């Protein structure tokens, strides 16, 4: 029996960028999401929380999905400034990024915290985009695979399946630097992630979990990176803020 894959996923992580005026960028993305592109690739935009609801409302009909960039593990309570997965779902999000390296670095999030957030995402009916990736020091010490495997084992909830889990491999040293690993390096890490998923998600479904590559993805390198085995899409930072660049990256799937 042949495995029917879900479409690859190209997600834009806008980080702390975006004001009301950014609706213009969203409109350009929607206009460029043609039926031909829709047939080949799923597009998701993860704006700052202030824009999640209005973006979700604007996207009804265009099928561009909306995601949050983080969530709290609890459903509600005295957590000033935080946002629950249920609130993101209520605002119209279908995805939430958890465990981004900027959260791990600046907010000291550990694997257990990331896992609790992914559990919350599932509880709220969201798909969790779980981020993993090594630092430059870890790569230079030859520890990349060990680090990524450990992060996965600690961060992926037991109830995960190919509909509620996406994994994003983002080498920390490649984020916002213009540097990318070689295609062979990406292939090696993604193969290790796939193998690990076999244990975490189960034999029946692990092959359908999408594994995204993230870190300095641009229109100029998207085709090469998206062609690597076990790369099922991209998590795009800077280039996702420019509609033409984001669409060109997704366009890598038009062949
Ligand atoms: O962190 C990233 C996406 O989550 C990648 O950022 P850049 O594409 O800007 O390198």
Image (cartoon, rainbow, N blue to C red):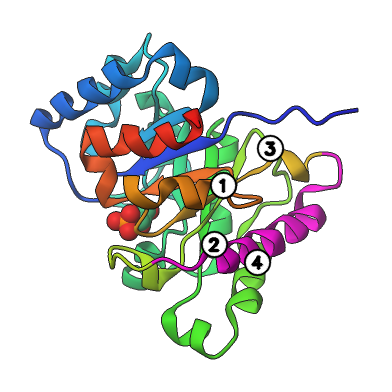
State which tag comes first along the sequence, 4 or 2. 2
Residue under label 4: 188
* Of pointers 3 and 2, the one earlier in the residue sequence: 3
Q: Are marks 1 and 2 in contact (CB under 8 Å)?
A: yes
Image-based side of 43 in relation to 123, left or right: left
| Location of mark 1 (residue) | 227
| Label of residue 67 in the image | none
* Mark 3 and mark 4 residues within 8 Å of each other at the beta carbon: no
Say which residue label 3 marks: 162
The 10 Å Cα crowd at callout 2, few under 14, some 14 to 19, many 20 or more, is some
How far apart are labels 1 and 2 at the CA level?
9 Å
Callout in the foreground (3, 1): 1
Give yes or no for residue 127 being in the magenta stretch.
Answer: no
Asked whether disc 3 touches disc 1, contact meaning CB atoms under 8 Å apart, the reply is no
Residue pushed farthest top?
A: 61
The answer to which of 181 and 58 lies nearer the viewer is: 181
Give the Cα separation between the discs numbered 3 and 4. Answer: 21 Å
Magenta-highlighted residues: 180-204
Measure the alpha-carbon separation of dots 3 and 1: 21 Å
Q: Residues within 10 Å of mark 4 (few under 14, many from 20)?
A: some
Residue 107: x percent and y percent? 34, 68
Q: Earlier in the sequence, mark 3 or mark 1?
A: 3
Q: Is residue 137 visible?
A: yes
Q: CA distance from mark 4 to mark 2?
A: 9 Å
Q: Give the Cα distance between marks 3 and 2.
A: 24 Å
């Amino acid at each position: 029996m042949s495995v029917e894959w879900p479409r690859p996923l190209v997600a834009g992580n806008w980080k702390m960028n975006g004001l009301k005026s950014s609706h213009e960028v969203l409109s350009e993305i929607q206009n460029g999401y043609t039926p031909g592109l829709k047939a080949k690739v799923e597009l998701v935009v993860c704006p700052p929380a202030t824009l999640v609801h209005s973006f979700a409302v604007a996207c009804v009909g265009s099928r561009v999905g909306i995601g949050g960039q983080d969530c709290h593990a609890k459903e509600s309570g005295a957590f000033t400034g935080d946002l629950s997965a249920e609130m993101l779902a209520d605002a119209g999000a279908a995805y939430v990024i958890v465990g981004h390296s900027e959260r791990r670095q600046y907010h000291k999030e550990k694997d257990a915290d990331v896992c609790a957030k992914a559990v919350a995402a599932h509880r709220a009916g969201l798909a969790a985009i779980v981020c993993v990736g090594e630092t430059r020091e870890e790569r230079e010490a030859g520890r990349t695979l060990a680090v990524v495997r450990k992060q996965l084992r600690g961060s992926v909830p037991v109830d995960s399946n190919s509909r509620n889990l996406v994994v994003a491999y983002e080498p920390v040293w490649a984020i916002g630097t213009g540097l990318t690993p070689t295609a062979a390096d990406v292939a090696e890490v993604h193969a290790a992630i796939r193998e690990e998923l076999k244990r975490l998600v189960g034999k029946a479904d692990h092959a359908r979990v999408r594994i995204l590559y993230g870190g300095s993805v641009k229109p100029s390198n998207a085709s090469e990176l998206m062609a690597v085995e076990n790369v099922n899409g991209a998590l795009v930072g800077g280039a996702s803020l420019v509609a033409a660049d984001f669409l060109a990256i997704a366009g890598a799937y038009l062949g």
